[in-house]
Image: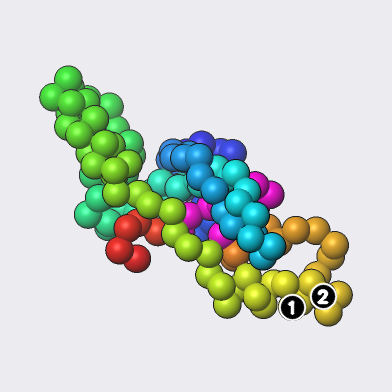
């Protein structure tokens, strides 16, 4: 596990890898803001996914892998990377966070979770087709 981030979906320390891609986000004023989209690979959340499952399986297996396994891992990683797309923020969650913030029900910090956006970094919630 990376130990640096909890999984944004399940909240556990099962993040195996983080895919970062530069992108942009358009704010309410219509300005395009540079961001980095992050896609977590979580041993708990992604194990059953057909794209990420093989990568999770490889990374969580014990010793004894050979060169052929590494070649297959490279193929699986490239396939996962090619299909891992930024998810759009959950607009309902974002609106609820903003409304709560204006009502003073949240401390005066930027929303940290549940919105898919954190301080210049978009944390993506799913694979393509979600
Ligand atoms: Zn997870």
Q: Secondary structure at mark 2?
A: helix
The 10 Å Cα crowd at callout 1, few under 14, some 14 to 19, many 20 or more, is few
Residue hosting label 1: 99
Q: Position of residue 47 (x, y in %)?
A: 31, 53
- Some atom of ligand 1 lies within 8 Å of the CB belonging to the residue at label 1: no
Above or below for 29 versus 32: below
Tell me whether the residue at label 2 lies in contact with that at label 1, contact meaning CB atoms closer than 8 angstroms: yes
11 magenta-colored = no
Q: Which residues are magenta?
A: 116-125
Q: Position of residue 65 (x, y in %)?
A: 21, 26
Q: Residue at x 59, y 39 (%)?
A: 4
Is residue 45 found left or right of 91 in the rendered image?
left
Q: Position of residue 89 (x, y in %)?
A: 53, 64
- The answer to which image quadrant residue 102 occupies is bottom right
Is residue 105 found left or right of 82 in the rendered image?
right
Which residue sits furthest front? 30
Toward the viewer: 21 or 1?
21
Is residue 112 found left or right of 71 in the rendered image?
right
Toward the viewer: 128 or 72?
128
Q: Position of residue 112 (x, y in %)?
A: 68, 58
Residue 102's disc is: 2
Q: Residue at x 45, y 47 (%)?
A: 40
Residue 41's disc is: none
Toward the viewer: 122 or 50?
122
Quadrant for the C terminus in the image: bottom left
- The answer to which image quadrant residue 46 occupies is bottom left
Magenta stretch: dominant SS? Answer: strand
Q: Residue at x 20, y 34 (%)?
A: 75
């Amino acid at each position: 596990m990376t130990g640096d981030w909890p999984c944004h979906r399940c909240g556990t320390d099962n993040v195996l890898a983080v895919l970062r891609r530069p992108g942009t986000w358009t704010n309410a004023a219509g300005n395009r803001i540079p961001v980095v989209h992050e896609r977590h690979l979580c041993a708990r959340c992604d194990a059953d996914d057909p794209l990420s499952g093989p990568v999770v399986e490889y990374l969580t297996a014990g010793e004894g892998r050979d060169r052929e396994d590494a070649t297959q891992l490279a193929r699986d990683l490239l396939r996962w990377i090619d299909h891992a797309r930024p998810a759009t923020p959950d607009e309902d969650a974002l609106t609820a966070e903003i409304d709560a913030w204006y009502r003073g029900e949240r401390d005066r910090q930027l929303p940290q979770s549940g919105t898919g956006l954190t301080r210049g970094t978009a944390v993506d919630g799913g694979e393509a087709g979600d």
